Amino acid sequence: MAAKNRRSKKPNLLSHTRPRKAQPLPPLSSRTTRNVIRKHHTLQKQLSQAVAVKNVPLATTIQSQIDAAGGLSTYQHASILGQSATRGGDSSRMLMEWLIPLLKGSLAHATTQSHRKLRLLEVGALSVENACSRSGYFDIERIDLHSQHADILEQDFMKRPLPSTELLQDEGFDVVSLSLVLNFVGDANERGDMLRRVGSFLRIKRDIERAEDWRKGTEDAFPALFLVLPAPCVLNSRYLDEETLERIVINEGYELVQKKLSKKLVYYLWRYKGAEETRRQSFRRLELRPGGARNNFSILVR
């Protein structure tokens, strides 16, 4: 009996073996974007409070609400849209507005051999195309808890290994950016811990005294912390106002270089001088502004 001719199986096309691309998330209006961000922050705060008092049933319910609203992915999508240049939300433009005059003056005296980019650590990075990225002044390391891009390392800043004193020159940074990050931390004590931790990554003047000559003249700004918060966190909080925030950051070894207050955001540029453990103070929650329309945002320092 003659064997049946078997039809040769054609190999799959390469395009058929590739994983499907993730479907892009739908566009959101500006109002929807704001509502998504606001709702996520509120639920995260409630979740942190439930976890703090070990109320497991309530924490489970709130987590279900977060998941039903799209979770972290939807929040980040809204945040990316909110911070896009087309909506005027790229907060790093303010940082560049402050730094470019200083950097241009320094680079005018630099040689090709001495010129090396400033190191910037961007915590909570959502985009690789913001003003800092396009400026050409920075060697940027970007991290986020839930990376949305191959050039953003998925990492928790609070678990990032601290550079040793010997390696701070190479592994430290000239600028650390906490843009709309501190307000996402649900616990007030952890916000204080995050602020304190930033200094361990900044290489202060004595650590870069052998560095490139083009940095001479920038001592009034570097190393720096760029801090951005939603305006209500500072301007309408029951427990935090401008004066208290400045006292807290100064307590960590910084001095204020620039600030800008707007209806939506508050921007700060701080120069790090180095904190003295013996002079650090603790900050506990005190009511500064009474009233039912206030929010409860605060930063506590232990």
Image (cartoon, helix red, strand yellow):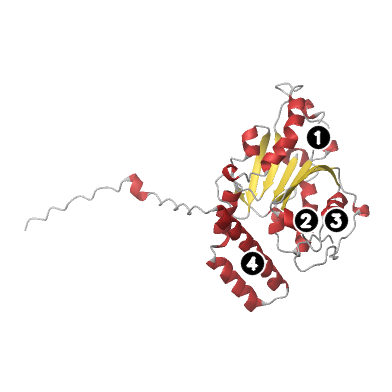
Q: Earlier in the sequence, mark 1 or mark 3?
A: 1
On the image, the x and y values in percent for residue 184 come to 68, 58
- 58 is higher (above) or lower (below) than 197: below
Query: What residue type is disc 3 on?
Result: Thr
**Disc 1 versus disc 3: nearer the observer:** 3
Marking on residue 208: 1
**Residue of label 2:** 235
**Residue of label 3:** 244
Whether residue 125 is visible, yes or no, is: yes
Q: Secondary structure at mark 1?
A: loop
Q: Earlier in the sequence, mark 4 or mark 3?
A: 4
Q: Please state, as top left, top right, bottom left or bottom right, where the N terminus lies in the image.
A: bottom left
The crowd level at tag 3 (other Cα within 10 Å; few <14, some 14-19, many 20+) is some
**Image side of residue 130 versus residue 262, left or right:** left
Q: How many marks?
A: 4
The crowd level at tag 1 (other Cα within 10 Å; few <14, some 14-19, many 20+) is some
C-alpha span from label 2 to label 1: 37 Å
**Disc 3 versus disc 2: nearer the observer:** 2
Query: What residue type is disc 4 on?
Result: Leu
**Residue of label 4:** 43
Query: What residue type is disc 2 on?
Result: Leu
The residue at the far left in this view is 1
Q: Earlier in the sequence, mark 3 or mark 2?
A: 2
C-alpha span from label 3 to label 2: 11 Å
Q: Secondary structure at mark 2?
A: helix
Residue under the point 93% across and 53% down: 279
C-alpha span from label 4 to label 3: 26 Å
The crowd level at tag 4 (other Cα within 10 Å; few <14, some 14-19, many 20+) is some
